[in-house]
Each structure stands twice: as structure tokens, then as C-alpha cells.
Amino acid sequence: MFSNFFKTFEIVTPTEPLPGSQATFNLFLKIMIQFLEFISNHLVLASMWVVTLVAIFFYHKRTSASSVAPQEAVMLINRKNAVVVDVRDRKEFDSGHIVDSLNIPLSKLKQRLNELIKHKQKPLIVVCKIGQHSGEAAKVLQDAGHGQVVRLSGGLSEWKAQSLP
């Protein structure tokens, strides 16, 4: 399909060395020709790859909340009295946690939403170990009617890496 189109491009094969930019361009052109030729020969496979990437993107967009860096979280806690909700298991929570944070494990979050009713007007910062599960918890809290819910970027490991209490 694209073979005839790309044959119109002349790939220079000089007898003497090319300057760096021309050699790089030739290499890039060869790779792009091979890539487009592969796509044209394997259209179903390439389409499935694109559909998978789009599905992953929309899944993450739908299930995650906005994130804040540890320094921004400190500002929210100090200036807006944000409440920190730690969604790790009790054992992990007891091994170390952010001061004054509430421990509500992710597996029990939906059953224990009533504990957060008194904090509905305050911002909530959702924390997990590395930031992997906090997006799901934040979405549950948003669906429960909490206004400003954010997740801690990098989780508690990033918090500890910045030597915060």
C-alpha cells in the first residue's frame, strides 16, 4: 500500500560519510518507512493496539482523581484543614503514617463512608503506599458526594522520601 509512495523518497547512500544530521535523517526515514509498511501489512493488529491504548487512557481518566505533590498536600493540610485518608491496610498504617490521618482500608471504604460525613466540606487527600490505589478510592469518595478529593502523588513512599512527618 505505502510501498510505492515511499519509493519516491530517495535515501542517500553516499560514498563519503554524511554529516550527522543527514545520517540521522536517513536512519529516521528508514525506520518510519518500515513502521508504516508494518502497519499497512498488519492493519488489524495495529488497530487492536490503538484501541487498547485508548481503552487504557479512558479507564485511567475515569477512575482517577487529580493528584497533588507532597508539598501541595502540606499546604492543603495547613491552609484548608484538609483531611488525610490513608487507604492502606491496618498493618501497613501502624508501621508508619501521616500525622492525624484517618485509616480506612480500600476494601472497607464503601462500608465506612459514614465516618467521613463530618468532613464533607473539607478537602480530602487520599494516600496509599505508592499512589497506585488512591485513584480508585478518590473516585469512590467523589461519587459519595465529597467535593474536593485529591490523591497524593507517589503515595506515602514519596512523602517519606521528602522527609515529611
Image: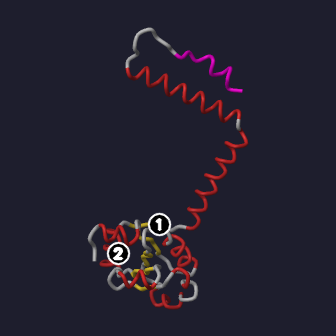
Is 109 positioned to the left or the right of 79 in the image?
right
Is 97 positioned to the left or the right of 8 in the image?
left
Helix or strand or loop: what does disc 1 sit on?
loop
Give percent across and percent down for residue 155.
40, 70
Helix or strand or loop: what does disc 2 sit on?
helix
Q: What residue span does the magenta drawing correspond to?
A: 1-11
In this view, the residue in front, 103 or 16, is: 16
Label 1 neighbour load within 10 Å: few <14, some 14-19, many 20+:
some
User: Residue at position x 35%, y 67% from top?
Assistant: 158
Which residue, given by chain and number where applicable, does mark 1 sit on?
A: 66
- Amino acid at dot 1: Ser
Instruction: Give the mark nearest the N terminus, 2 or 1.
Output: 1
Please identify the quarter of the rendering in which residue 109 is found: bottom right
Which residue, given by chain and number where applicable, does mark 2 sit on?
A: 76
In this view, the residue in front, 30 or 5, is: 30
Is 66 positioned to the left or the right of 43 in the image?
left
Q: Which mark is residue 141?
A: none
